[in-house]
Amino acid sequence: MISFKQRIDMIAPWVIAIVMISLFCWLSEGWSLIVTFVPAVPVAVWLYFKTCYYTKPEPAAVLTLYLVGVGFQLLHFAEEHAFGFEKQFGVLFGGQPYNHNLFVTFNMAAYFMFILGAIGFYKGIRPFMFFGLFFIVYGMIGNAVGHIGFCFAVGGYFPGIYTCFFNLFVGIVLIRKLFKYRPALDT
């Protein structure tokens, strides 16, 4: 018989994923968030059920690198903010420039969720780990891939390209650790 906690651990990521996809579609200027953020959500769901759902990662194995990644992401946001990412991102995908206040608020809310991801890894709270997995999938790895594509699309510099690579290797190492580290099954 499945316990209440196991049901929450099973259902919560799906609910969070649906809310995230809905918000990304609603807030997207043109196709910007739909093409970039939305595909990372099902990948994060898959990663959750392949790693954290069955085995809680040992905090010492992932937390330090994860928090370094959050710090790098703040530096990445600083570059994007300083050089007008919000003015160019939506336009690149057929929309309007993002409202500056929306851009900053969206990013600050995302960083709050990424901190919840750290708490999830530290305290073993699986639904919070889903936020962390989304950050690893898109904030770390997908972000670097996306910024390379943005530079090719505009034929030059696109805000965020210099700092997007900080997290690429951190994200890859974290995914390897999540798959490699397999403690005994727990409930």
Image (cartoon, rainbow, N blue to C red):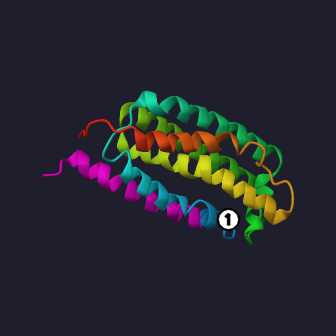
What secondary structure is marked by label 1? helix
| Residue that lies at the very extreme toward the right in this rendered image | 156
| Residue that lies at the very extreme toward the front in this rendered image | 180
Residue located 55% across and 32% down the image? 65
The segment highlighted magenta reads 1-26
| Amino acid at circle 1 | Ser
User: Is residue 132 depicted above or below 151 in this figure?
Assistant: above
Q: Is residue 20 magenta?
A: yes
Main secondary-structure element of the magenta-colored stretch: helix
Regarding residue 164, the answer to whether it shows in the image is yes
Locate residue 127, reporting x and y percent.
38, 46
Taking depth in this image into account, of 55 and 181 the one nearest to the observer is 181
Residue located 57% across and 43% down the image? 171
* Residue, disc 1: 32
User: Is residue 21 depicted above or below 113 in this figure?
Assistant: below
Locate residue 83, reporting x and y percent.
83, 47
Locate residue 20, reporting x and y percent.
50, 58
Regarding residue 98, the answer to whether it shows in the image is no
